[in-house]
Image: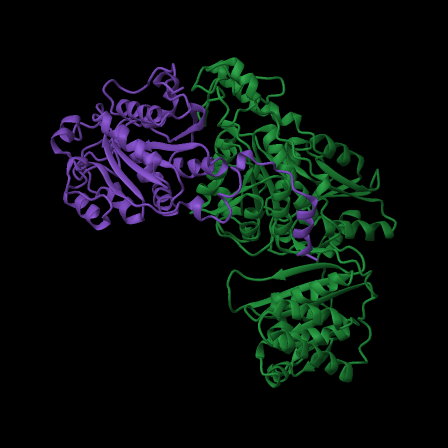
Chain colours: A green, B purple
Amino acid sequence: MDLISWKIGGEQGEGIDSTGDILATVCNRLGYYIYGYKHFSSRIKGGHTNYKIRISTKKVLSTSGDLQILVALDQDTIDLEYKELVPGGLIVADTKFKPHLPEGCEAALLPVPMTEMAKELGNLQVRNVIAVGVSAYLLGLPLQGFEDMVMEKFGKKKGMGEVNVQALRLGYEHAESLFSVYKDFRLAPGDGKARLLLIGNEAAALGALAGGCRVMTAYPITPASEIMQYLIPTFPQFGGIVVQCEDEIASITAAIGAGFGGARAMTATSGPGLSLMQEGIGLASMAEIPVVVINTQRGGPSTGMPTKQEQSDVFAMIFGGHGDSPRIVLTPSTTEEAFYDTALAFNLAERFQCPVLVATDLAISLNLTTVDNLDLSRIKIDRGQVANTEELLKMGRDVFKRYAVTESGVSPRSLPGQKYGQYLATGIEHSETGKVQENPDNRVNQMNKRFRKLQGLDVPGVHYNGAENPDILLVGFGSTTGAIDKVIDELTEDGVKAAHLHVRVMWPFPSKEIKAAIEKAKRVVVAENNAQAQLLRLIKMEVGHYDHVESLLKYNGNPFLPSDIMGKCREVLG
Amino acid sequence: MATTLAEFKTAEKSWWCPGCGDFGVLAAMQRALVEMDLNPEMVTIVAGIGCSGRIGNYINSYNFHTVHGRTLPTAMGVKLANRDLTVLAAGGDGDGLAIGMSHFMHMMRRNIDITYVLMDNHIYGLTKGQVSPASDPGFVTKSTPAGNIEHPVRPLELALAAGAGFVAQGFSSNLQQLAELIKQAVQHRGFSFVNAISPCVTFNKVNTYDFYKEGLTNVDEDPNYDATDRSRAFAKVVETESMITGLIYREERPSYEDLAAGFMKAPPVANQDLNLSPERFEKLLSKFR
């Protein structure tokens, strides 16, 4: 087979994540493409959790509603997950909990005495690795890569690598002797290319580093913390620093202070943190200081659903906070784009001297994906307009106009240390020289200047693929891209002219491109993970009302499955 | 060539009321900067919201007038970006002890090498006379018409408790001492705190110049006072109900920057070449293969 979905489920705290990571890493090294989706709750121990890994010879960018192999560490996992299994699907279950199939379940039950075998090996912790051994056999994968992997992972502790290798072999041999009839789910060989396997948060962190960011100030929050955690040991190797702050208000204002001081600086957060940062983001807009905020969207409002998928901060990112505050909002849709967009954000923040928000969502932030490459040569650092030190010296003091009204709206900024570049950066309305100034004409000139900058944004606002004049156009942003593309492929195979428009810059809104695409399409469906149809409302506000545009919303905490979107397409197409 | 006072002054007309204590704090700060022979472009002052927040407008350094209560994290950011800069934060008792209280506590234990001058007048002046967290019990203001029923915040006690390595209090009328304390604070490695008593002549008719002139004692003039003894410092502050000026406590210890891995070995972030070498980037990527 070219594509298999494998899932492990049990109680939170039973090593579900690390078991899944072993399988994913080994398969990635064998040249398969991985898409790993963790289902977890906001607690450390207890409660059902599962980790689904799609293993494919081709790129995969979404989760799915089907499953071939389920590894169950408890009966709950079987009862909750069996419906996903395809007919003839396999349930590998620990005999310890006396597994049984629910009525009507068409899967085959493959009992394995995992706990008993682990006991015999003298280490209960290797139970899950036995299941990996069984899985390796069922997937038709050679054991060598797994053995290398567990030696790497556990070998540092004396004897631990060896016992894990034994566990793998026990599982594999058990399956070989008892389950050899189950041949349906053997994978076609991978191409042997070891690509990158990482989550969106790691990609964003690497993007920040590559984009020249050297100061990060942040407060831990799900699902953003991995960005900070990756950079804490990494930044110092490159002359940078991460400070874990006392709250998100300190985080944003410290990042802005660092931007003022001449560093490329950022913070990363999620919904509740974004709310706290709004006043600071307004300050960066007003004082025209570059800063980057990564917002990993999760279920809101308030504490909402911290570990669940949502895309409901669109309004907050564009319009949050008081007053009229220009911002740029980028919406990467994949792990790669999280890397490139984050790097890009630092150029934009310095070129346009304003806050730039990089909006991922939980699925991008945390899902493990195979990426062909992250190409450093595509990243060119552009620090925007900085005042010339020599020219400042010639000017003498009190001459430099930090907030000069220019055609583009961008005025060269000076940096502390530059003689005669001294100015007052303030959140109060100010004159061209930075002095407090509430004169009505000055207010209008400065406000217009700040917003005029955004008109110069030269980044493609949308990504479009599929038919030119489609019968159906699907519109989305963020992590929905994989599920939408899957549906486009299926529709195209069925002879339907289908196309996909993905919004890549949420603000300034790419109205022109969206208008053209909507007007060329017979029917349009806007798919998004929020309850208020935030993207569709933006379209109505910025582009117009159209009778042939419909909304598809999913806000139950789970990402779209291709089947959700296909269902809506069938309904719309009649 | 030594810097002059003129280089640290701006042409901007002050908005403070005649007789405001903030004039003394401004003059002391300017004098300290001149005496340290700092170049104005190498100084950044981060000021808060309130009457005192305008202090930066009158000093010809780089200035950042941040949002209410956030002088300290903003100043930390500036220092992280360019540690060659002398970074001062200045703001009122409302800015620092009400809305900004948590940053005050955390910055002291974090020990970033910046100086915080709290311009303390026990009242909200810019909003025309409401009670401040530093106000005394019984104090009648627009928001406490029946008198303040809350216990006051004591910034010196808090600073000692939170682990500040440099704690001092000055009085805006004693320009020479205040300037000297600010100077020592800037020269101290790590976070330094100077509480600057700065009477409000318009809205505070209790904590007046005369009130302080009569009540304050100067520990700098006390040969028996030992500013390196933390428990003695604490006792002194409690005994006198903070009615003292001078260097109250000083402890030499490494700053945050000194302890942060590799930070002092690299050039200041603002001066770095930000381009990555492909080899080093590939090394990072190899961990994900």
- Seen in the image, is A60 located left or right of residue A449? right
Looking at the image, residue B137 lies above or below residue A199: above
Image quadrant in which you'd find residue A15: bottom right
Please state which of residues B178 and A36 is positioned toward the viewer in this rendering: B178
Quadrant for the C terminus of chain B in the image: bottom right
Image quadrant in which you'd find residue B144: top left
Image quadrant in which you'd find residue B257: top left
Residue found at the very far right of the displayed protein? A495
Looking at the image, residue B189 lies above or below residue A511: below
Residue A35's spot in the image, x, y percent? 71, 58
Residue B101's spot in the image, x, y percent? 34, 42
- Number of callouts: 0
- Please give the name of the residue rendered at 59% of the width and 44% of the height, measured from the top-left corner: A532
Residue A286's spot in the image, x, y percent? 50, 27
Please state which of residues A494 and A89 is positioned toward the viewer in this rendering: A89
- Please give the name of the residue rendered at 14% of the width and 30% of the height, measured from the top-left corner: B211
Residue B91's spot in the image, x, y percent? 34, 32
- Seen in the image, is B186 located left or right of residue B279? left
- Please give the name of the residue rendered at 37% of the width and 40% of the height, measured from the top-left corner: B189
Residue found at the very far left of the displayed protein? B214
Residue found at the very far front of the displayed protein? B1
Please state which of residues A311 and B35 is positioned toward the viewer in this rendering: B35
Visible residue check, residue A105: no
